Image (cartoon, rainbow, N blue to C red):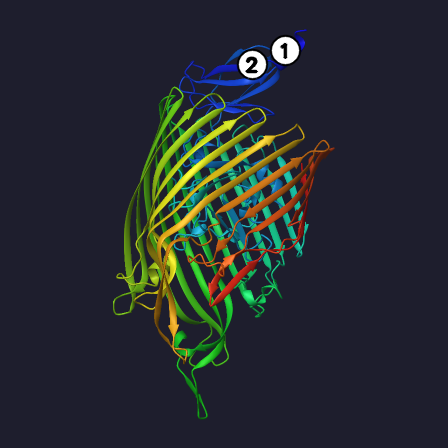
């Protein structure tokens, strides 16, 4: 008679996590294997799981600097589990990025992606496409199929406002502030995990994060030797070949890992091909208290330009149209990265992380230009007979040759288990050479081979120092973060006489952050935070202005509040945010005092919204993950400047058009994603992936005639894994993108008329993975 009651009974599992000296380990992660339940130890090292059914559970405990522990528990009544963690015999790679990441109980909006999650979709598309199912993310591709020039927006903010670090080292270009994924082809194959923070987030190195940040950690220690072959083929003549090898841990102290990749694709847009090559090499020494790792990686790209998009007038007739016809209208660039990472534990309380880095980039884009003025290239008119010729067709190359180098560091001090201090920072220098040359001209005038027509060097320094502290008492955790950043930038710009002269800008920023999180019980927590961020204008904002018209830096105050919950079958998070800008830089169409169209500061603008992210394990075979974001993105008062021409086509002035509470461009008010995964057979998974992006405006006027229509795109992924003889794993994956053949565009701009970037119709990628 009692059996039904026992079967329905629910129990509590609690316990304490300590070190070998019985000191509580506040913040230790506790998970129940095979479920979505996880918890963090409080200030006294205690954790609790409630409402557990009777059965057998495997408890997994982890804490940086200690060996992971695992214990099996049979639960038929309330139980108390005490777990004593032993110090790790060698230092773990996780310490390398710990200073610039949000902890599990951090009062910020973030999402972690593991190697396993990244591998599922890594069939050749650029890294932004592997993040497309996360909250508030929108991705786009110039060539239309996710290979070549791709970009990502978070909360409507473009790549120049998204801070990207690789092992804590800044990746964004120091001048344009963008992150160019085409220079890192197949980089995801060397990534162990990624943390995506939304909003200002925690202090990190590099440019200020206004939309979000991507904190990437590359390969970590793998104890056994391995070899992997990953090959993909697909639509538009796409092919990807990747070789991964590693020695495992040798003599308990050394490891070497390597990767070699190539990706080729013709692209969806006509002639928008990509020819990409890359490698990654890493060697590490693991000591009991020290870790030394050297990374060398490189990317080489050649892509046919698809930057112009498709004019709206041609979109319905020829959505794969490319305005470029010159055979070698290509972008060519090589980027080499060198990183030396060192970590050392002086004691159980004090740890140091440091890194030296150097990035060398060189390349050009080549283009055919017709009817160019000789004077624009430093050439003189020529006379043939009685005709004076002052224009010519020509082919030019625009070069970038840059060096970026510096150091990053952090000290982590934990005097007691519930108090944590971090002091960190970086100093970086950037030396960029910009120059152009003419390699052919119909009329050569007084030119020579590789005629130079501009030469513009720039030098930038970036210093920052930050201090973080977290204090856990009972179920509450307080967080504070202060950062000082100083920028020095020397560049060629215009003076008041319109002469192009060397100028210098020096900026100082102070960015405070504070927050609190509270653990309601073992499964639920709430948090709130306030952050201030500042960032400098980009290269063009400076070089195309004078000191009188130079834009001011942008500033933002970011308020975040949320609720996190996890259970045996689900985890979910709700985040509310308000991002309030002062002097945000936007395009207004205004001509400045040197005759250039550059971005202007708008006094007040904001983004207010809510984000939902969760996963539900419906059955052992069926799960559903989903994310959604609803937001209002407005400029309070905005003036658009429109050129006015006379009857002869001469510019006579500009007309001012005023807008109140107008939408910020490229900021959809609603985005959503879904992944429904089903395992009909052992080692088999079918996943249906969906993405919805609401209407986006091409400018800041809320004009429906200048907009990207809402789109709803669905993909199907089928994966099967098995093993055979000496093969640890044989993996087959089929990814069918845009399975319902949605005709949509994901990006665009206005230049006289609307121009759009159409995305590929139904297409596929098929992958075979062999692991030895």
Q: Residues within 10 Å of mark 1 (few under 14, many from 20)?
A: few
Q: Mark 2: few, some, or many residues within 10 Å (few <14, many ≥20)?
A: some
Q: Nearer the viewer, residue 581 or 495?
A: 581
Q: At x 64% / y 46%, what residue is drawn?
A: 715
CA separation in Å, label 2 and label 1: 13 Å
Q: Is residue 749 in sight in this rendering?
A: yes
Out of 611 and 506, give the one closest to the viewer. 611
Checking the image for residue 681, the label placed there is none
Image location of residue 681, percent across then percent down: 73, 32
Outermost residue toward the bottom? Answer: 386
Please say whether residue 135 is visible from this viewpoint: no
Q: Nearer the viewer, residue 552 or 657?
A: 657
Q: Nearer the viewer, residue 253 or 759?
A: 759
Q: Quadrant of residue 656?
A: bottom left
Residue at the image point whose x is 47% and y is 53% from the top: 666
Residue labelled with disc 2: 11
Residue 198, image x, y percentages: 44, 41
Q: Which residue is mark 1?
A: 5
Q: Where's residue 421, x and y in %?
A: 34, 29
Tell me which residue sits at (72%, 31%) in the image. Answer: 682
Above/below status of 3 relative to 691: above
Chain-order first, disc 2 or disc 1: 1
Q: Is residue 396 above or below residue 122?
A: below
Q: Nearer the viewer, mark 2 or mark 1?
A: 1
The quarter of the rendered structure image containing the N terminus is: top right
In the displayed structure, would residue 526 be above or below residue 576?
A: above
Q: How many marks?
A: 2
Q: Quadrant of the C terminus?
A: top right
Q: Is the residue under label 1 in contact with that under label 2 (CB below 8 Å)?
A: no
Outermost residue to the top:
1
Residue 762: image location, x then y, percent:
66, 53
């Amino acid at each position: 008679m009692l059996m039904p009651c026992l079967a329905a009974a629910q129990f509590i599992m609690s316990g304490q996590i300590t070190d070998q000296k019985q000191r509580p380990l506040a913040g230790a992660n506790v998970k129940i294997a095979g479920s979505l339940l996880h918890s963090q130890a409080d200030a006294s090292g205690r954790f609790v799981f409630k409402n557990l059914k009777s059965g057998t559970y495997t408890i997994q405990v982890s804490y940086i600097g200690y060996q992971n522990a695992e214990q099996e528990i049979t639960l038929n009544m309330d139980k108390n589990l005490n777990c004593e963690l032993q110090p790790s015999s060698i230092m773990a790679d996780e310490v390398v990025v710990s200073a610039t990441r949000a902890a599990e109980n951090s009062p910020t909006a973030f999402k972690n992606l593991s190697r396993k999650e990244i591998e599922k979709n890594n069939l050749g598309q650029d890294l932004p496409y592997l993040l497309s199912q996360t909250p508030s993310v929108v991705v786009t591709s110039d060539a239309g199929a996710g290979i070549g020039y791709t970009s990502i927006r978070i909360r409507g903010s473009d790549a120049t406002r998204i801070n990207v670090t690789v092992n804590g080292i800044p990746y964004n270009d120091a001048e344009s502030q963008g992150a160019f994924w085409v220079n890192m082809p197949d980089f995801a194959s060397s990534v162990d995990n990624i943390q995506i923070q939304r909003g200002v987030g925690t202090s990190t190195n590099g440019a200020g994060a206004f939309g979000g940040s991507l904190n990437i950690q590359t390969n970590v220690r793998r104890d056994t030797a391995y070899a992997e072959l990953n090959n993909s083929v697909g639509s538009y003549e796409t092919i990807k070949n990747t070789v991964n090898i590693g020695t495992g841990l040798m003599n308990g102290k050394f490891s070497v890992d390597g990767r070699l990749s190539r990706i080729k694709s013709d692209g969806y847009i006509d002639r928008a091909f990509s020819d990409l090559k890359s490698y990654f090499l890493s060697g590490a020494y693991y000591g009991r208290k020290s870790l030394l790792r050297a990374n060398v990686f490189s990317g080489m790209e050649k892509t046919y330009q698809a930057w112009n998009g498709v004019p709206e007038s041609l979109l319905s007739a020829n959505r794969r149209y490319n305005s470029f016809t010159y055979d070698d209208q290509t972008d060519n660039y090589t980027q080499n990265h060198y990183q030396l990472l060192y970590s050392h534990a002086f004691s159980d309380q004090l740890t140091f992380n440091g890194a030296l880095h150097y990035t060398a980039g060189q390349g050009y884009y080549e283009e055919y230009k017709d009817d160019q003025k000789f004077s624009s290239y430093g050439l003189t008119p020529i006379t043939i007979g009685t005709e004076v010729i002052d224009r010519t067709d020509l082919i030019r190359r625009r070069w970038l040759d840059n060096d970026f180098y510096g150091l990053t560091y952090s000290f982590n001090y934990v005097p007691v288990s519930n108090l944590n201090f971090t002091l960190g920072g970086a100093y970086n220098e950037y030396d960029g050479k910009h120059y152009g040359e003419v390699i052919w001209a119909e009329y050569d005038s007084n030119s020579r081979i590789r005629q130079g027509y501009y030469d513009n060097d720039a030098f930038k320094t970036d210093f920052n120092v930050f201090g973080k502290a977290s204090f856990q008492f009972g179920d509450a955790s307080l967080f504070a973060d202060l950062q000082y950043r100083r920028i020095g930038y020397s560049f060629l710009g215009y003076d008041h006489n319109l002469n192009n002269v060397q100028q210098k800008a020096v900026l100082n920023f102070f960015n405070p952050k504070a927050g609190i999180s509270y653990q309601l019980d073992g499964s639920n927590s709430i948090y709130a935070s306030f952050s201030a961020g500042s960032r400098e204008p980009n290269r063009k904002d400076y070089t195309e202005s004078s000191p009188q018209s130079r834009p001011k830096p942008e500033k933002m105050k970011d308020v975040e509040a949320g609720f996190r919950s996890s259970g045996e079958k689900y985890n979910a998070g709700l985040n509310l945010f308000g991002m309030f800008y002062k002097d945000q830089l936007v395009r207004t169409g205004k001509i400045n005092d040197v005759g250039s169209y550059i971005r202007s500061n708008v006094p007040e603008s904001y983004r207010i919204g809510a984000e939902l992210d969760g996963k539900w394990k419906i059955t052992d075979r069926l799960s559903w993950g989903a994310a959604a974001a609803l937001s209002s993105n407005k400029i309070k008062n905005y003036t658009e400047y429109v050129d006015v021409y006379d009857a002869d086509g001469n510019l006579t002035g500009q007309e001012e058009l005023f807008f109140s509470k107008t939408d910020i461009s490229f900021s959809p008010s609603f985005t959503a994603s879904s992944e429904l995964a089903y395992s009909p057979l052992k080692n088999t998974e079918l996943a249906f992936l969906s993405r919805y992006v609401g209407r986006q405006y091409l400018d800041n006027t809320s004009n429906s005639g200048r907009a990207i229509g809402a789109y709803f795109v669905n993909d199907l992924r089928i994966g099967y894994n098995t093993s055979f003889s000496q093969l640890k794993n044989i993996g087959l994956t089929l990814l069918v993108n845009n399975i319902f053949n949605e005709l949509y565009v994901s990006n665009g701009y206005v230049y006289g008329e609307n121009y759009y970037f159409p995305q590929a119709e139904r297409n596929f990628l098929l992958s075979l993975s062999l692991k030895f």
